[in-house]
Amino acid sequence: MKYALLPVIMAGGSGTRLWPLSRALYPKQFLVLQGNQSLFQQAHLRLQALGSDDIEVGKPCVVGNEEHRFLVLDQLRELKGEPSSLLLEPVGRNTAPAVTLAALQATADGADPILVVTPADQTVTNEAAYTEALQKAVRAAANGDIVILGITPDRPETGFGYIRTAQADANGVRAVAAFVEKPNLETAKSYVADGGYFWNSGMFVMKASRWLAALEHFRPDIAKATLESFAVRTTDATFVRPGKAEFASVPSESVDYAVMEQCPAKPESGFVVRMVPLDAGWSDLGAWDAVWQVSEHDDKGNASQGDALFQNSSNTLVHATSRLVAAVGLDNVVVVETPDAVLVADRNCSQDVKKVVATLDSAKRTEGTLHRRVHRPWGWYDSIDSGPRFQVKRIMVKPKASLSLQMHHHRAEHWIVVSGTAEVTNGDKVLMLSENQSTYIPLGTVHRLVNPGTIPLEIIEVQSGSYLGEDDIVRFQDNYGRSA
């Protein structure tokens, strides 16, 4: 028998506890924390590797939000991949409605695949063990059970929920007796000693129709409201947008509270949850302390990424992105450097980093939302200098990409080509500029920048004027749906 598998990657979330590397518009799931692939890309590759003689893996269904849609596409295309669909949540409503959108999309054409649902921001060190466990879960879910992946605990952990299990069958699949809230330290120690408790990974496997039936049974309000939103969806290529007003009325609830915890508590419902143990060096990278734990350490317990030097320091993490960072006389500390912000924290307090982001947001500062380098569908720009009435940006435009046809009311711009070829619309003229050539865009002039070539285009843009905010832009035509 051949099992049809649909990977579902939950790519929402802002990753506030990994600030300043993670920002709202470039959150942790799209970051490269180790190696040369982002956490989202690693999740995609792990799921595609589940194929076997009896398992056929389809293109992924990705659930995310509007602001990240081009990040998802770009990162999949770097791996020569494409999504089957990209479901764009108008507002965040937790994981139960998000999974329901994926199940509705999966069954819209009459199919009923087995969904393998995983967050986009986890990591494993033993991919062979991961593949074996997920394949076992797929086969166990084929009969209609809901199967969750439980992490074999290697320490008493108070930051995770636990799964209490009963006996295992001949295939090593365990019955789930109950879901347990995050314990205190003494209780967590007893769980580890017991051997029947596992961390809740947030990964689960079930047929799409079975999820919809379980949600209808336990939370018909969520099922009804999500279906109403999906029924008025709009589709643009791979982008699927549920009705905004309808989705805003969906109750916000997690998968665990809506369905998972209900099943063992109410066995008369007929919905059974089983668990496959996963011992694969798993981490949810929920904070900088978790990043330190999964990193390679020197003989004093230090870990680093980027240009870092340690002197008389131990058990310390340094993540440098743009310059040398030297750590002297530090113990149990996290140092994270970005071009516009630096974090220094006790490793034991790394969960509190999210409070910094909340403070930035309440003060209406942009450092919680944007990096200095801002990614756009066409490429990126980096604000390298600014002062009264001027701003300097480095701009990269992808091959064959184009900025919008636009105009500014309060600023003029000078463009200098550093590398590549630029096609410039400047008023009623269209110019072709190559390396070291430049042009001037007067205030109020309609203009556009296009990269007609096959290599990235880089320019330096010097803005001057009375107001230089990003909201001083009138778009007349845009390839990415952003024109007025």
Image (cartoon, rainbow, N blue to C red):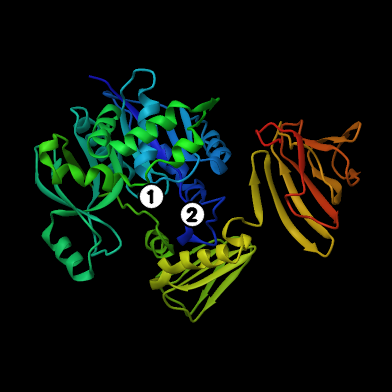
**Nearest the camera: 332 or 70?**
70
**Could you give the CA–CA distance between mark 1 and mark 2, rounded to whole angstroms?**
10 Å
- Horizontally, residue 230 falls left or right of residue 140, namely right
Whether residue 49 is visible, yes or no, is no
Mark 2 is on which residue type? Leu
**Front-lying residue, 420 or 104:** 104
The local secondary structure at tag 1 comes to loop
Residue located at (73% from left, 56% from top): 383
Question: Is residue 261 or residue 138 the one in the foreground?
Answer: 261
Q: Quadrant of the N terminus?
A: top left
Q: Residues within 10 Å of mark 1 (few under 14, many from 20)?
A: many
The number of callouts visible is 2
**Labelled pair 1, 2 in contact (Cβ < 8 Å):** yes
The residue indicated by pointer 2 is 33
Q: Disc 1 or 2, which lies upstream in sequence?
A: 2
Residue 109 visible in the current orientation: yes
* Image x and y of residue 113, in percent: 31, 25
- Where's residue 191, x and y in %? 16, 61
- SS under mark 2: loop
Q: Which of the two residues, 46 or 233, is positioned nearer the viewer here?
A: 233
Which residue: 79% across, 46% down? 459
Q: What residue sits right under mark 1 in the picture?
A: 123
* Left or right placement of residue 48 versus residue 455 in this view: left
Residue 433 at what x, y percent from top left? 87, 37
Measured along the vertical axis of the image, is residue 4 above or below residue 21?
above
